[in-house]
Image: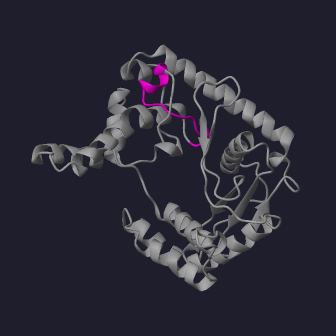
């Protein structure tokens, strides 16, 4: 979604902030200022019937070079949410689907996913086995988390500036404008007789990856009038619901500290955007950490990024 933005942000195609723990600052700027403008232009070229064969070939090359990773884990989460939406969220005719039909829709969505490699194919096959029961557990957890909701709302964009920032923060709660669903999938293991280790549900939100989710829902809380957030985790064995009633990290005082930290991060990003007159200057002001998980991308994508930062 494009909207009014200061010149110093729009010149870098930077339209909104997001969860700062989802990726490092260099990755965010690389995606927004370098990757997305080229990808968007490539799609426009392919949609334009007046484009020449040479222009279409260049566009396809851009899409190949700058494509980002998809994975069976991500697709499993998407398929689970699709099924949950169909079962829980009323459509325009105020109808929902029964569990079997909703689950089938999720399974069919997962079946349509094309794995990136042999390992991803193995994961897809395993997750198709797990998907129906993960969906069942996810629905149970969501119903528990939203037991007081008169009408369950699905994913909706929240967009607004945090105090002292000029560019808005954007976030997408999965449900009720205040909660998110997370799925945990089995992973290959040489230590297990079955060859798989179950995806573990967190016992608290203090871990590094779960704290990323706390930062995510803190964004919900900052933009929805401080409605109490929730996180639902589901796997093939069970589900777990985190709310302010059982989790200190989801209470107002903690969330305010998180929002303050997010705001400071965004202000720093805005200062960097102001200081850079072009893309080259922008990238000179940040240093990527290619060892971080957020840089786990295809080789062509990484090669271009490392060339920009002169990393061999």
Q: Quadrant of the C terminus?
A: top left
Q: Which residue is rendered at x = 11% and y = 45% of the image?
A: 52
Q: Residue 240, located in which quarter of the rendered image?
A: bottom right
Q: Residue 145 location in percent, x, y?
A: 78, 64
Q: Which residue is rendered at x = 83% and y = 65% of the image?
A: 148
Residue range corresponding to the magenta coloring: 7-22
Q: How is the image coloured?
A: one colour
Is residue 42 within the magenta segment?
no
Q: Residue 231 location in percent, x, y?
A: 73, 57
User: Which residue is more in the foreground, 143 or 48?
Assistant: 48
Q: Which residue is rendered at x = 64% and y = 25% of the image?
A: 165
Residue 186 visible in rendering: no
Q: Which residue is rendered at x = 84% and y = 42% of the image?
A: 252
User: Please, is residue 77 above or below residue 298 in the view?
Assistant: below
Residue 225 visible in rendering: yes
User: Please, is residue 160 above or below residue 100 in the view?
Assistant: above
């Amino acid at each position: 979604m494009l909207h009014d933005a200061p010149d110093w942000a729009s010149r870098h195609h930077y339209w909104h902030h997001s969860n700062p723990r989802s990726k490092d600052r260099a990755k965010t700027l690389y995606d927004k200022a370098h990757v997305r403008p080229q990808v968007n232009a490539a799609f426009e070229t392919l949609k334009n019937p007046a484009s020449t064969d040479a222009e279409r070939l260049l566009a396809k090359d851009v899409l190949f070079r700058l494509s980002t990773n998809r994975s069976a884990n991500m697709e499993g989460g998407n398929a689970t949410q699709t099924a949950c939406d169909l079962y829980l969220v009323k459509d325009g005719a105020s109808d929902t689907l029964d569990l079997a039909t909703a689950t089938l829709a999720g399974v069919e969505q997962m079946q349509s996913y094309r794995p990136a490699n042999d390992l991803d194919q193995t994961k897809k096959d395993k997750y198709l086995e797990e998907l129906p029961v993960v969906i069942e557990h996810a629905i149970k957890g969501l119903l528990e988390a939203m037991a007081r909701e008169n009408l369950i709302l699905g994913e909706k964009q929240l967009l607004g500036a945090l105090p002292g920032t000029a560019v808005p923060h954007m976030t997408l709660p999965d449900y009720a404008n205040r909660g998110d669903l997370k799925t945990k999938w089995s992973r290959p293991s040489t230590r297990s007789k079955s060859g798989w280790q179950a995806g573990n549900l967190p016992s608290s939100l203090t871990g590094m990856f779960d704290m990323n989710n706390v930062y995510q829902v803190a964004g919900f809380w900052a933009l929805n009038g401080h409605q109490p957030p929730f996180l639902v985790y589901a796997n093939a064995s069970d589900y777990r619901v985190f709310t302010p009633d059982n989790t200190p990290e989801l209470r107002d005082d903690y969330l305010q500290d998180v929002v303050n930290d997010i705001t400071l991060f965004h202000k720093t990003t805005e200062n960097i955007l102001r200081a850079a007159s072009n893309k080259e200057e922008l990238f000179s002001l940040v240093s990527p950490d290619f060892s971080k998980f957020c840089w786990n991308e295809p080789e062509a994508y990484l090669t271009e990024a490392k060339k920009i930062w002169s990393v061999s």
